Image (cartoon, rainbow, N blue to C red):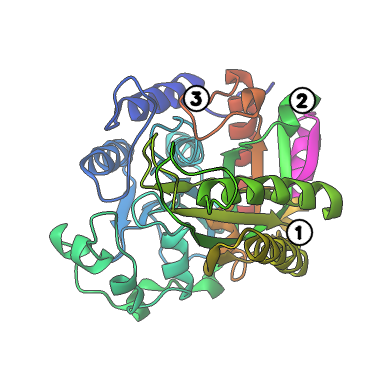
């Protein structure tokens, strides 16, 4: 394997970021705009400064680290995010940021000069852990989110994004100043862990992403009737949790029967009320999330599942309220960038797999404006968003080398 990147520096950086968490010993918890987020950003700024790189942060919190050269050059971009889910893994997002930073450091060390320049972007609030809205930073960059969303997006304490930005001394929001010149950005490549089992099961170190799945999320509120758990006969009960459990099983049945193998559905969050051992649950709120590579299929499967929920509610004599809370369209990666990655992998004599991404990523949002693609490296046992998230070191370096050589070829 050719050694393009500094391996020790990459692993050192990943370990340092791993330490910056609000839940020591319980994975990485680093929400956007938090104190741990500020510390992680300070670490990146320190590293950038040590190599004479320029760093800028926009009015929403996206950070850009750039080579100190002619700003009029066309741009090749890479990047990811450093925010996390609660008690998540240390590689999710951070891997792409650190490896992108390493590319810029190696360019500076070798004093390389190209026709185009390279930018590293650190997207803010990718996970949605703070404001319950994924890929927030890229949505503001592309104009999908605007000033009105500063007041719509709220954290668990009810604080709006506008308020959080003000408390963190961000300048007054201006959407026109925020949006980059997309005509000048010629490519975007993000390196990320797969977050699924495909590469690990196949024993392949590199995935080249052709499509990023879209998703549709509904919140379902079920209203039954609370009553004494011991004194209420089983016949005639309006148990909201029993009904919700039937919905979960029906969801699995429909996807397995009517899905094409690439669509998935998840009931991933439940709130049970009054949530006591001796009271029949009278109210349950849960989420339904459907993901897949085609918007039409996402919509049709979602409606198929929700129709079954309505029929079940009528039969069980409970009330349901269904609200759509989020939709992210599927994205197709740019064929020319995918081809560039393939050619580099072949040059490096590294096997690879063309594949889809089941998770959403900022690159998807950016791909509507910039020719884009992604590199995946395996997640051991397919584990991600958990403290046991891990990737073999040799796979990390293979991903970093593929990222670096492809970026440099596109910049030349």
Secondary structure beneath disc 3? loop
Percent x, y of residue 242: 57, 46
- Range shown magenta: 340-356
Magenta stretch encompasses residue 353: yes
Name the residue carrying label 2. 201
Which of discs 3 and 1 lies nearer the camera? The answer is 1
Percent x, y of residue 290: 66, 56
Q: Can residue 7 be seen by looking at this rendering? A: yes
Name the residue carrying label 3. 6
Secondary structure beneath disc 2? helix
Q: Quadrant of residue 329?
A: bottom right
Percent x, y of residue 59: 28, 66
Name the residue carrying label 1. 336
Distance between mark 3 and mark 1 Cα atoms: 28 Å
Name which of mark 2 and mark 1 comes first in the sequence.
2
Distance between mark 2 and mark 1 Cα atoms: 28 Å
Q: Residue at x 34, y 52 (%)?
A: 130
Magenta stretch encompasses residue 236: no
Figure check: 346 above or below 224: above
Name which of mark 3 and mark 1 comes first in the sequence.
3
Q: Residue at x 80, y 28 (%)?
A: 349
Q: Quadrant of the N terminus?
A: top right
Figure check: 196 above or below 240: above
Of 166 and 305, nearer the camera is: 305
């Amino acid at each position: 394997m050719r050694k393009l990147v500094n391996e020790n520096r990459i692993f050192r950086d990943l370990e340092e970021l791993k330490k910056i968490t609000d839940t020591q010993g319980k994975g990485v918890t680093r929400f956007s705009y938090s104190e741990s987020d500020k510390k992680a950003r300070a670490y990146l700024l320190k590293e950038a400064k040590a190599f004479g790189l320029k760093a800028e942060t926009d009015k929403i919190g996206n950070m850009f680290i750039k080579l100190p050269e002619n700003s009029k050059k066309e741009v090749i971009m890479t990047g990811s995010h450093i925010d996390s889910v609660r008690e998540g893994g240390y590689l999710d997002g951070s891997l792409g940021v650190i490896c992108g930073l390493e590319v810029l450091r190696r360019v500076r060390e070798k004093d390389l000069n190209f026709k185009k320049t390279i930018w590293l972007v650190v997207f803010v609030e990718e996970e949605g852990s703070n404001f319950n809205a994924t890929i927030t930073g890229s949505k503001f960059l592309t104009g999908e989110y605007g000033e009105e969303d500063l007041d719509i997006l709220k954290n668990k304490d009810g604080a709006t994004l506008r308020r959080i930005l003000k408390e963190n001394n961000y300048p007054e929001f201006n959407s026109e100043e925020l949006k980059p010149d997309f005509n000048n950005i010629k490519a975007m490549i993000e390196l990320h862990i797969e977050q699924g089992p495909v590469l690990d099961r196949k024993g392949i170190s590199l995935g080249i992403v052709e499509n990023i799945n879209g998703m549709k999320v509904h919140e379902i509120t079920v209203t039954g009737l609370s009553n004494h758990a011991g004194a209420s006969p089983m016949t005639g009960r309006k148990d909201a949790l029993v009904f919700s459990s039937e919905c979960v099983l029906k969801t699995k049945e429909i996807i397995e029967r009517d899905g094409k193998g690439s669509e998935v559905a998840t009931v991933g969050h439940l709130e049970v009320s009054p949530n006591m051992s001796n009271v029949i649950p009278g109210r349950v709120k849960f989420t339904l999330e459907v993901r897949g590579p085609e918007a039409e299929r996402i919509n049709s499967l979602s409606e198929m599942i929700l129709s079954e929920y309505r029929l079940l509610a009528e039969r069980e004599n409970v009330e349901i309220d269904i609200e759509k809370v989020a939709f992210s369209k599927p994205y197709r990666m740019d064929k020319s960038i995918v081809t560039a990655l393939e050619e580099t992998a072949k040059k490096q004599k590294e096997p690879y797999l063309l594949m889809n991404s089941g998770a959403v990523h900022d690159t998807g949002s950016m791909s509507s404006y910039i020719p884009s693609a992604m590199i995946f490296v395996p997640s051991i046992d397919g584990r991600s968003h958990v403290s046991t998230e891990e990737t073999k070191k040799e796979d990390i370096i293979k991903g970093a080398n593929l990222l670096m050589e492809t970026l440099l070829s596109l910049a030349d």
